[in-house]
Image (cartoon, rainbow, N blue to C red):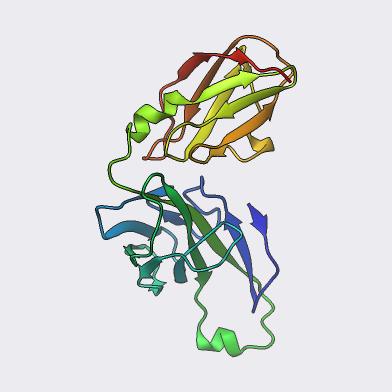
Amino acid sequence: MHFERPLAGWLLLTLSPCLLASPAGGISLGQTRLIFPATEHAQSLSIKNTGSARYLVQSRVQKGIDDPSAAPFMVTPPLLLLPGKSQQLLRVLYQGAELPEDREAVFYLAITAVPAQTAETFNDRKNTKLSLGIRFMTKLFYRPAGLTPSHADAICRLQFQHTKQTLHAHNPTPYYITLGTLNFAGKALDLAAREPMLAPYASADFPTSTSTGQVQWQAITDHGGLSSPCIANVQWKQP
């Protein structure tokens, strides 16, 4: 998470896609990721306010976590008032743009919740109170029809090689696979040091001082939890 510059009396706190609940105001999402099958026209996501304050909520789908360019999806309602102790359902609609048919595509659902102010509070120039706004960034995976194997089966199909200083991971599947845990020769590797999501047919390198042993990993499932552990032998890769 990171803080952004104050804007019009409120401070924006951006939460990573893996977080469900906000540390401020009791705002939370019903899930950490959205799977959008190509065979369907819309998907739903709930946003809940367990606090007492009202929030203005703006939602949109963008191309990347740092790329605010519009994606081929529309959220309805795009702007709503979420009272305290209430819940609202957001609908994400696919707009029909051309996307790859042989692999998944990933986008980001950006949901910004800002405390709603009364007219009296907004016009009170003596009021110096800074409100905390929250932005959730949730991954949206567009999944074409007919991909094989299933996403659950694809997780254990990752391939690994190693050199003296690096564990090389390759994703031979048409899915985005996000590692939740990664162990080599019984030692946990630091997934915070780099992006743990492997794109379809792409590779990534993870630093390690271990030169031999088995690799064990878990990935994030479609439901946001950890998969069952996968275990594989590691091939030596000539540097």
Q: Quadrant of residue 170?
A: top right
Look at 47% across and 49% down and name the residue there: 20
Residue sitting at x 63%, y 26%:
168
Q: Position of residue 94 (x, y in %)?
A: 33, 63
- Which quadrant would the C terminus be assigned to in this image? top right
Q: Does residue 183 appear in this view?
A: yes
The residue sitting at the top extreme is 213
Q: Position of residue 29 (x, y in %)?
A: 41, 54
Image position, residue 225 (x, y; %):
42, 35
Position above or below: 51 against 140: below
In which quadrant of the rendered view does residue 68 lie?
bottom right
User: 163 or 212: nearer the eye?
Assistant: 163
Left or right: residue 228 compared with residue 130? left
* Left or right of 99 in this view: 130: right
Give whichever of 100, 91 is nearer the camera. 100
Q: Residue at x 45, y 70 (%)?
A: 57
Work out whether 167 lies above or below 123: above
Q: How many marks?
A: 0
Residue 204 point in image, percent of width and height = 62, 34
Q: Is residue 18 above or below residue 44?
A: above
Q: Say which quarter of the image contains residue 133.
A: bottom right
Res 139 visible:
no
